[in-house]
Amino acid sequence: MTLPTAHTLFDVSDAVCLITGGASGIGLAYAEVMLANGAKVHIIDRDQAAIDAALAALGTPTSAWGHCADVTVADQLAAAIAGVVQDSGRIDVAFVNAGIGGGPGFLKGDGERNGERSFEDLPFDQWTRVMDVNVNAAFRTMQGVVRVMKQHGGGRIIVTTSVSATKTEQHVGTPYVVSKAAIAHLVRQAALELVRFNITVNAIAPGPFITNISGGRLRQADARAPFERLIPMHRLGTDMDIQGAALFLASPAARYITGAHITIDGGFSLGTAD
């Protein structure tokens, strides 16, 4: 028997990879690691300028494409998925990553109550917008790629959820927390049904990361401070912290894993350490 090597275990060369919300933040981090390991990468994002900037940052490789689409608009999303198939013939790996934040939580960074974020005053239009992007669009994306994967013998779906899916939050808006709980259970439900078709469905659940979500508010020192105090590692996550799990779940090394959630949060969900 030939023993596996790191190269064979994590080989994603020529895998066709779709990434929603792939022009920045965690989505771009997924694109970087997949491209660096030989995959064909298709970025779907609603901002064409951001797509152009992302492709330039990736070195404008011939194995990377951009598709401009708003994932909440069914026709645009379907056209983007069809474009991936037209360009590369199939979809092997889908990172269902597009998402938005739900604004600040009911506590400010100093521990005082945030009167503007009281439960009864949360704007309903914000609630519906967060659900539409984080839940409904993710569901539509999964449906679209499953149709393609079934035609080609299987594939990998990797959904970006959050540690907020399994814990309450003081500093994160309620709509976001609830949306991530919903999509986390959708991952389990889809995994159960789709395993018969050689489609695995798993999730990466990040803790606080510095991204453009919620207007990039965690780039601000005062917004980061409460999280830095609570996280046992006392820092927020970076691109490199999430790329290993992404490569793992997309690779043959994860072939017997489905319905799993990999938490990447510096110990945040465990509680305070000091």
Image: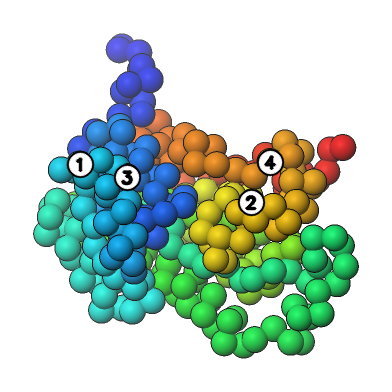
Q: Which residue is mark 2?
A: 208
Report whether 165 appears left or right of 149.
Answer: right
Given this view, does label 3 or label 2 mark the residue nearer the observer? 3
The answer to whether the residues at label 2 and label 1 have Cβ atoms under 8 Å apart is no
> Whole-percent x and y of residue 254?
42, 36
Measured in 3D between alpha carbons, the distance from the residue under mark 3 to the one under mark 2, in whole angstroms, is: 24 Å
Q: Which residue is mark 1?
A: 61
- Residue at 25% x, 34% y: name it: 38
Q: Secondary structure at mark 3?
A: helix
Viewer-side residue, 121 vs 136? 121
| Residue type, label 1 | Pro
The answer to whether the residues at label 4 and label 3 have Cβ atoms under 8 Å apart is no
> Whole-percent x and y of residue 229?
80, 46
Q: Residues within 10 Å of mark 2 (few under 14, many from 20)?
A: many
Quadrant housing the N terminus: top left
Q: Secondary structure at mark 4?
A: loop
| Residue type, label 3 | Ala
Q: Which residue is mark 3?
A: 57
